[in-house]
Amino acid sequence: MWNLGCVGLLLQDTDCNVVNSNSNRSKGNNHSFGRHGATTSVKSPSGDPLFNIAPSPNNKMKSPPLVSLEEEPCQLNGVGEDYVEFNYTNNRLPSSSSQSALTIDAVIGKKYPVYARDISRGEEKVKIPLVNEFSSNIHPLKLPNILYISTNMVHKDAHIDFSLARLSDDNCCSSCVGDCLSSDLPCGCAAETGGEFAYTPGGVLKGEFLEKCVMMNKEPQRKHYYYCEVCPLVNDLSQKGKKKVKACRGHLTRKFIKECWSKCGCSKRCGNRVVQKGIQVPLQVFATSEGKGWGVRSVTALKKGTFICEYIGEIVTNQELYERNKERAAKKEEHTYPVLLDADWGSERILKDEEALCLDATEFGNVGRFINHRCGDSNLIEIPVEVESPDHHYYHVAFFTVRDVEAMEELTWDYGIEFDDIYHPIKAFKCKCGSKYCRNKQKIQR
Ligand SMILES: C[S@@+](CC[C@H](N)C(=O)[O-])C[C@H]1O[C@@H](n2cnc3c(N)ncnc32)[C@H](O)[C@@H]1O
């Protein structure tokens, strides 16, 4: 798998092999994008997982329909043009075989095909439409078949050691009141970001903090890497004991944001709570014109440092992901959606390889799973955010803009893939990012 940075997004490829970019844990047959991510299993004080996805008897989960006919028609915020809605049959999105009916050719003028009014089914505060401006003959696209979730959910075997009791006074600001950002001295929650809050009162990331995060991604120094003894990203763990152990190539340790939370005394409206408030910008999932599949854009212009969304998925163990990948490889699935949650690195304790966690958004996920890759100059960065847990075993993978973004511009992040990495057991996808920094330039045949 390719590992996406400190907060990792793992996308499996069709061969189901693990591709390690510049840092990561991977197992056998996964593809992960990005550098590193961390996941936690969220547990109630009794120790039971708070969010648990019960597997069906054959351990495979069925995805319910994306849209419900009871919903009000959604507005395409800000587009201001006519649009066409298509009839759904049996309360489901039309299958890809009937997709030919859903083409821009079928409508007159500037009408706008809307495949789904709100793919989040009301899970998000904003509606997220799914649109396709292109003829399906030119850009045939399978309709996504996922259950939209807005919170990470724990698969049965994933263990997240998370409880209120683990939050000591040092890990929250119980004596604060109101808005921590307006107090004279930053509270303890700012310690993670060097004693200064990461956010401005306007709710965006401070420029200096953002620049540091970008620089760490672009030009990581040696001191930013952690090297593990038996690296699951370069070793097939199922072969442990049988094969020679390959050396870890290093895992990028990242800057974290620590947000105030329920055990803090401040208000729910405190300015140090941004990611936990959820998506605020009017996002659309749209058909890309370059053949990258679906992508994500905002209908309005965005300021630098704006929170976009989290990468949400099922929290699964590395072992579970390995098993799933084997099945997906057999089915030759085109796009895959796992992100490595690098629970190990920088954590309080050393985890067993089997306990390492990933976010798999293949069947359960949010809009973050539709964000495409761009080499070098993407307009988003993924930053790990601590909310409920004091260690870095579990954290949220949050996307922020690294510059001002125009309305309807595609939102992208750099998965951290090294396309020419001959040591990777799998071939990555052919990159169509169009960036002048594209690391896959030589290999593209358009
Ligand atoms: C996390 S998904 C992104 C959403 C995906 N486009 C879809 O339609 O669901 C990652 C997959 O999107 C495609 N993709 C993402 N970025 C790409 C790029 N720059 N060039 C070509 N394909 C890309 C690849 O198939 C990759 O496996």
Image (cartoon, rainbow, N blue to C red):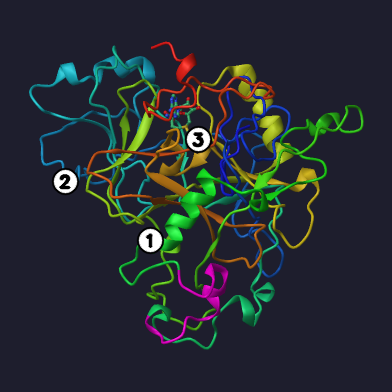
The residue at which mark 3 appears reads as 63
> Residue 60: x percent and y percent?
63, 33
Q: Which quadrant is home to the N terminus?
A: top right
Residue reaching furthest to the right: 241
| Res. 92 visible in picture | no
- Which callout, 1 or 3, points at the residue further toward the start of the chain? 3
Amino acid of disc 3: Ser
Instruction: State left or right for residue 28 relative to residue 434.
Output: right
Mark nearer the viewer, 1 or 3: 1
Distance, label 1 to label 2, CA atoms, is 28 Å
Amino acid of disc 1: Gly
Q: SS for tag 2?
A: loop
> Residue 430: x percent and y percent?
48, 19
**Residues shaded magenta:** 182-197
Q: SS for tag 1?
A: helix
Q: Nearer the viewer, residue 379 or 15?
A: 379
The residue at which mark 2 appears reads as 78
